[in-house]
Image (cartoon, helix red, strand yellow):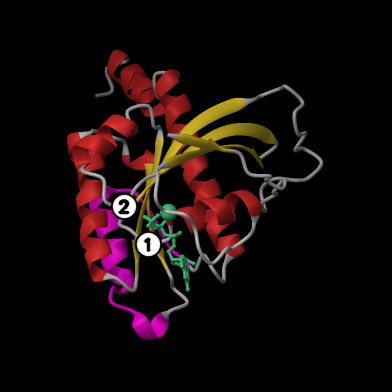
């Protein structure tokens, strides 16, 4: 497996003020393992490179699986990310092996390729049902929204799938939409990290339910 580091620019969202984001301050540094899955050609490499560098490059080498190691600034924190750019034709068994330490999953399909939607459906159900990954840590992304004349999958189909899993859904154009790509990445990271910290603390809802149960309210 190959490791790549891209020169990422510090990024700020509506919720992150430039003043609060102190790069490399050493405080609050967290890390997250991410994987981007989906059929060949759906835009996995384009999605990662766009989110990390702002750039959209037309063609990407797809001969091998690689992992991008980078730093993302968001919400006043510095986050070390390792993003696996998976091979589109991997078997589920191979994917399970290469993503055993992954915390956040993006499942991509192209709105211009119905078979990629079928694959995304299988992948997201596998993650949720067989791997028991919490929906807070799965995000379905429909790509190539700019190619409307070639559309094979309607937005409601993606939304319906995400609703079934209970996860987030975004329909974006990676080529035309830097901000929408970034929004999908940041919101997915927030959702997954919130879930992780709730789990660590025993979970807000668990705590509330336990308290209620203890005081005889349940
Ligand atoms: N018009 C348009 N083209 C896109 C978009 N996203 C990706 N592409 C193009 O789709 C092609 C495939 O993108 P890749 O990022 O290489 O796809 P991939 O999923 O990494 O493919 P493999 O590595 O072969 O599995 C490239 O020519 C991209 O430029 C998009 O949102 N709109
Ligand atoms: Mg690729």
Query: Alpha-carbon neighbours of circle 1 within 10 Å: few (<14), some, or many (≥20)?
Result: many
Q: Is mark 2 within 8 Å of ligand 1?
A: yes
Q: Which residues are magenta?
A: 148-172
- Kindly identify the residue that appears in the image at 40 percent across and 32 percent down: 103
Q: In the drawing, what numbered circle is on residue 14?
A: none
Height in image: 145 above or below 29? below
Rendering coords of residue 112 (x, y %): 33, 74
The answer to whether residue 118 is seen in the rendering is yes
| Camera-side residue of 171 and 210 | 171
Height in image: 103 above or below 208? below
Q: Which residue is mark 2?
A: 88
Q: Are marks 1 and 2 in contact (CB under 8 Å)?
A: yes
- Identity of the residue furthest to the front in this view: 63
- Identity of the residue furthest to the right in this view: 19
Q: Quadrant of residue 100?
A: top left
Q: Is mark 1 within 8 Å of ligand 1?
A: yes
Q: In the drawing, what numbered circle is on residue 42?
A: 1
- Identity of the residue furthest to the top in this view: 214
Going by the image, does 107 lie left or right of 10? left
Rendering coords of residue 21 (x, y %): 75, 38
| Camera-side residue of 37 and 79 | 37
Q: CA distance from mark 1 to mark 2?
A: 9 Å
- Kindly identify the residue that appears in the image at 71 percent across and 48 percent down: 9
Rendering coords of residue 37 (x, y %): 35, 48
- Kindly identify the residue that appears in the image at 77 percent across and 26 percent down: 25
Provide the secondary structure element on which disc 2 rests.
loop
- Kindly identify the residue that appears in the image at 63 percent across and 60 percent down: 55
Q: Is residue 81 magenta?
A: no
Question: In the rendered image, which quarter contains the C terminus?
Answer: top left
Q: Earlier in the sequence, mark 1 or mark 2?
A: 1
Q: Quadrant of residue 119?
A: bottom left
């Amino acid at each position: 497996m190959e490791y790549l580091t891209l020169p990422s620019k510090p990024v700020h969202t509506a919720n992150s003020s430039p003043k609060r984001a102190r790069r490399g301050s050493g405080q609050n540094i967290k890390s997250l393992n991410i994987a981007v899955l989906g059929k060949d050609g759906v835009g996995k490499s384009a999605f990662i490179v766009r989110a990390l560098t702002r750039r959209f490059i037309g063609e990407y080498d797809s001969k091998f699986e690689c992992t991008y190691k980078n730093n993302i600034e968001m919400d006043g924190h510095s986050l070390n990310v390792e993003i696996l750019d998976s091979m589109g034709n991997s078997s589920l068994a191979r994917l399970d092996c290469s993503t055993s330490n992954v915390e956040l999953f993006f499942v991509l399909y192209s709105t211009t390729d119905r078979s990629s939607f079928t694959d995304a459906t299988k992948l997201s159900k596998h993650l949720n049902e067989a791997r028991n990954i919490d929906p807070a840590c799965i995000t379905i992304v429909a790509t190539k929204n700019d190619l409307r004349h070639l559309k094979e999958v309607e937005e409601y189909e993606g939304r319906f799938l995400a609703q079934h899993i209970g996860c987030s859904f975004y329909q974006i154009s990676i080529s035309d939409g830097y901000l929408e790509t970034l929004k999908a990445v940041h919101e997915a990271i927030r959702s997954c990290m919130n879930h992780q910290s709730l789990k660590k603390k025993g979970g807000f809802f668990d705590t509330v339910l336990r308290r209620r149960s203890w005081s005889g309210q349940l």
